[in-house]
Image (spheres, helix red, strand yellow):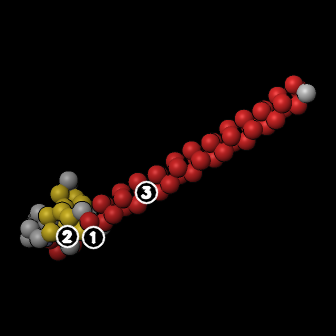
């Protein structure tokens, strides 16, 4: 009889352990997804000033040369 109780308790403990582990993994992946999304959004909204004409462009569109940002190839060539 005592063996049967131990077995039942063991199975419940095992199921509980598996459940908690799965829950933690789900929470972690959810958190990571949120962080990545937030980073992407911040990156897309980042604006930098063109060194030549002083207009602001999105970081994805600018050209980087000698540590300075340029809005276009024309601005980059003007500085030389
Ligand atoms: Zn420019």
**Residue on which disc 2 sits:** 57
**Residue on which disc 1 sits:** 61
Q: Is residue 72 left or right of residue 11?
A: left
Q: Residues within 10 Å of mark 1 (few under 14, many from 20)?
A: some
Nearer-the-camera pick, 47 or 26: 26
The image shows residue 34, relative to residue 15, as above or below, that is below
Q: CA distance from mark 1 to mark 3?
A: 25 Å
CB atoms at circles 1 and 3 under 8 Å apart? no
The answer to whether residue 80 of the structure is visible from this angle is: no
Callout 3: helix, strand or loop? helix
Q: CA distance from mark 1 to mark 2?
A: 7 Å
**Residue on which disc 3 sits:** 34
The image shows residue 36, relative to residue 50, as above or below, that is above
Nearer-the-camera pick, 12 or 78: 12
Q: Residue furthest left?
A: 53
Q: Residue furthest right?
A: 1
Q: Position of residue 62 (x, y in %)?
A: 24, 67
Of tags 1 and 3, the one toward the viewer is 3
Q: CA distance from mark 2 to mark 3?
A: 26 Å
Q: Is residue 12 left or right of residue 40?
A: right
Between discs 1 and 3, the one toward the N terminus: 3
The image quadrant where one finds the C terminus is bottom left
CB atoms at circles 1 and 2 under 8 Å apart? yes
Q: Image quarter for residue 61?
A: bottom left
């Amino acid at each position: 009889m005592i063996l049967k109780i131990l077995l039942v308790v063991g199975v419940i403990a095992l199921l509980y352990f598996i459940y908690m582990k799965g829950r933690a993994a789900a929470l972690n992946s959810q958190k990571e997804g949120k962080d990545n999304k937030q980073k992407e959004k911040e990156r897309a909204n980042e604006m930098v000033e063109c060194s030549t004409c002083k207009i602001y462009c999105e970081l994805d569109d600018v050209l980087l040369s000698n540590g300075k940002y340029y809005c276009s190839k024309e601005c980059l060539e003007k500085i030389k």
